[in-house]
Image: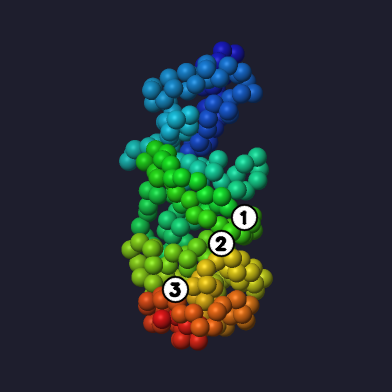
Amino acid sequence: MKTTDYIAYTVDRLPKGYVFTYDDFYNGVNNKEAIIKALNRMAVSGKIEKLSKGKYYKAEKTIFGNLEPPQKQIVKDLLEDNGKIIGYLTGLSIYNQLGFTTQVSNTIQIGKNEVRPQLERGRYFISFVKQKNTITKENIYAMQLLDVLRFIDKIPDTTIENTLKRFIELLKKMEAKEISNLQRLALKYTPSVRALLGAILEEINLADPELLKNSLNPITKYKIRGAENILTTTEKWNIQ
């Protein structure tokens, strides 16, 4: 089978929205230059879309135009390496998904143990957030929630009061072992995150936050304006 025919055949079998590179075709074609030329010709003809240098996708077509790939597809090489999880979507990438805001951002934020400079892919800006905990599939949701508290005053189109209300709703759906893991992971976050999580847990009486309390300096004050309107425990946790 000719290179162009093989690539066209393979692309046809890929799901819509799947982001691929020339590496996806190496099993059938060993000539990297031929693969790149064939993919670029397909992009020019409109059969596939070019996301950024060396990255392409097969768009899902609608009456409103072509849909972009899911954010997770756009940055999947930054989230996983040879089956190992090395990053996770967080911050502006997940506020809408978790119900903290109705706003959708063109910035994709990724939590990683080792951060790197911001980059661009298509219309998206990709930035990185330092995560001190070990990143595993089981820890991702808890770290996303802790990142909400970490950047609680930077969530667009909402208030700290509304963020706390939504946060409490999500906590109430978690099991005791998940809450315990949340507290354990919080120990590697800033003191203000630990204090706020402790105040929330004490407010809704879901778990004993003594672990968090013992990790804090008893004379340090934390400025989180608006928290006192939702939580009656802020004074005990030195939140102002």
| Distance CA(mark 3)–CA(mark 1) | 25 Å
Q: Which residue is mark 1?
A: 135
**Kind of residue indicated by mark 3:** Leu
Q: Residues within 10 Å of mark 3 (few under 14, many from 20)?
A: many
Residue at image location 49% in from the left, 79% down from the top: 220
**Which of the two discs, 3 and 2, labels the residue nearer the N terminus?**
2
Residue at image location 65% in from the left, 40% down from the top: 82
Q: Which residue is mark 2?
A: 143
Residue that protrudes farthest toward the top in the picture: 2
**Which of the two discs, 2 and 1, labels the residue nearer the N terminus?**
1
Instruction: State which quarter of the image contains the C terminus.
Output: bottom left
Judge whether 170 appears above or below 128 on screen: below
Q: Position of residue 197 (x, y in %)?
A: 53, 74
**Kind of residue indicated by mark 1:** Ile
Q: Position of residue 135 (x, y in %)?
A: 62, 55
Q: Quadrant of residue 96?
A: bottom left
Secondary structure under tag 2 reads helix
Between disc 3 and disc 1, the foreground one is 1
Whether pointer 2 and pointer 1 mark residues with C-beta atoms closer than 8 Å, the reply is yes
Q: Residue 164 bears which disc, if any?
A: 3
| Distance CA(mark 2)–CA(mark 1) | 9 Å
**Kind of residue indicated by mark 2:** Met
